[in-house]
Amino acid sequence: MQTIIQIRLKPSEAAENSSLLKAIGQITGQALETIKGYHILKKSIDARSRQQIWVNLSIVVFINEPPSHRFAQALHFPLLPSSVKEVIIIGAGPAGLFAALECIQLGLRPIIIERGKDVRARRRDLASLNKEGIVNPESNYCFGEGGAGTYSDGKLYTRSNKRGSIDKILRLFYQFGADENILYEAHPHIGTNKLPHIITAMREQIEASGGKVLFEKKLVDFVIKKESIQEIITADGDRMKAAAYILATGHSARDIFSLLYEKNISIEAKPFALGVRVEHPQSIIDAIQYHCLLRDPNLPPASYSLVEQVSERGVFSFCMCPGGIIAPAATAPGEIVVNGWSPSKRDNPYANSGMVVQIDVLTAAHFLKKNKTALPDNHPLLLLAFQKEVEQAAFRLGGGLQVAPAARLVDFCNNKISANLPAASYLPGLMAAPLQEALPNFVHHTLQEGFKAFGKKMKGYYTNDAIVVATESRTSSPVRIPRDADALHHPQIKNLYPCGEGAGYAGGIVSAAMDGQRLAQQIASIL
């Protein structure tokens, strides 16, 4: 017999199998020897009470029968015959990889071309970036196998539950090597240390099924005739043809946006968010969220989610990384971009989060005119130009290479250059600087007021033990590539399918993966 129960336990009880089994027995009224096993279906932490933190569990219990495997069988990927139609997928990030896996299940051969390197070779370029401040424009935190998702630490939480099957995405991650807990945690997370192995396993499956993944293969041109792509051209001179083309190049492929614009292929400016990374000692966030001096070892490092309206402009936390680090995410020399990630154990001594302000076309246009950057207000690359200008200003304010400008949090809010900076996780180094010289005035002011408001919501958050680092600017794409609402192809190019974050249709690993699957399904339905 199987039965589903709800349990609320103290963290120490939830962490200990014997305590959990005892609680299951009490709730089901069954003797322990009749309980043959259980699967956790959902798990969340309730830290609202100052007296006691609770772990809420939804569990399926197996009584007098052996526990089944969580899935009866793995999702199947067939070996494709040579005669099947091919789909070229441009970009090996989450959207591209999951589009490829879906193509295989639907009987299409995916050919992925990726401008960057495989995860192993990519690691060396990331080491040079962190240790020497050297940016490889083709291999960095955004470009390479797995895309930006590989080094965004694998946050798998999304609100996009109507765009596809979240369960299938999580199941595939689990099938390719992620821990089982991603299937039931309220905010599932894989960890940057584990993602490369999972991405590699996905690629090996694609190749084993007859697909191809080609690295250091950069798209540089389309040949278009009669509203269709006839072939694409790569930087090494190869010309490639397929029945359909999925464009999944991510939010930082500025050359692709420029190529589309130059080819008179419709694109449009898309509002996004820009700001800074803020980093606290993890112990401060733990104390605030768990109402204690020391975190219970059975609890994970605490996180937070904050939002505020300042003069009718939104400021909010983004990509919060408990037990994480701040990483250099620039894709070209001469710019400073910072991002955050966490390892699977989230055991670094710092907690960081993007703290960003919503950017729209009107405010970006005003800023660019003030800075004498001549672009019409209706230019599709206007917000990209704004993003680039802020990143370059941060670079000029920093200490050279990838040394980022920074300030202690209270100093930042008081327009003060910090006399010194606390220890921090950002490896290329930090330089105390007046961040108002890098950030647009409205962004700087909104962040200042936002931090003060957040300090009232979370007592202890507003402190000079925290540090602010500029600039967090790649929250999402500043360009949208339009597509037909039903057919999902570009309105002008009938066999071009814009996909994922770079096209403006996703905002994270899971939503990008679902978008890739959706486009593969659409293509399969018409080929």
Image (cartoon, helix red, strand yellow):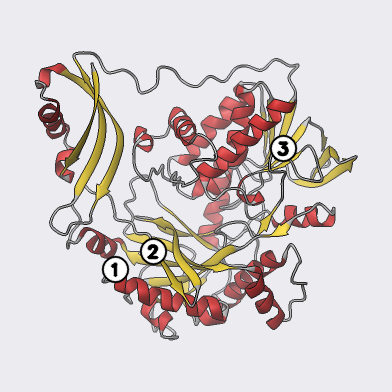
Circle 2: residue type:
Leu
> Which residue is tagged 2?
306
Circle 1: residue type:
Met
Q: Residues within 10 Å of mark 3 (few under 14, many from 20)?
A: some
**Vertical position of residue 191 compared to residue 38: above or below:** below
* Residue 262 horizontal/vertical position (percent): 83, 57
Element at label 1: loop
Which mark sits nearer the N-terminus, 2 or 1? 2
User: Mark 2 and 3 residues: CB-CB less than 8 Å, in contact?
Assistant: no
Q: CA distance from mark 2 to mark 3?
A: 37 Å
User: Mark 2 and 1 residues: CB-CB less than 8 Å, in contact?
Assistant: yes
In the picture, which quadrant includes the C terminus? top right
Which mark is in front, 1 or 3? 3
> Which residue is tagged 3?
487
Which mark is in front, 2 or 3? 3
Which mark sits nearer the N-terminus, 1 or 3? 1
> Which residue is tagged 1?
458
Of 138 and 69, nearer the camera is 69
| Marker count (numbered) | 3
User: Mark 1 and 3 residues: CB-CB less than 8 Å, in contact?
Assistant: no
**Vertical position of residue 312 compared to residue 64: above or below:** below
Left/right placement of residue 407 relative to residue 249 reads: left
Quadrant of residue 410 within the rendered picture: bottom left
Q: Is residue 451 visible?
A: yes
Which mark sits nearer the N-terminus, 2 or 3? 2
Left/right placement of residue 335 relative to residue 232 reads: left
Q: Residue at x 34, y 50 (%)?
A: 346
- Residue at far front of view: 486
Left/right placement of residue 463 relative to residue 517 reads: left
Q: Is residue 297 visible?
A: no
Circle 3: residue type:
Ala
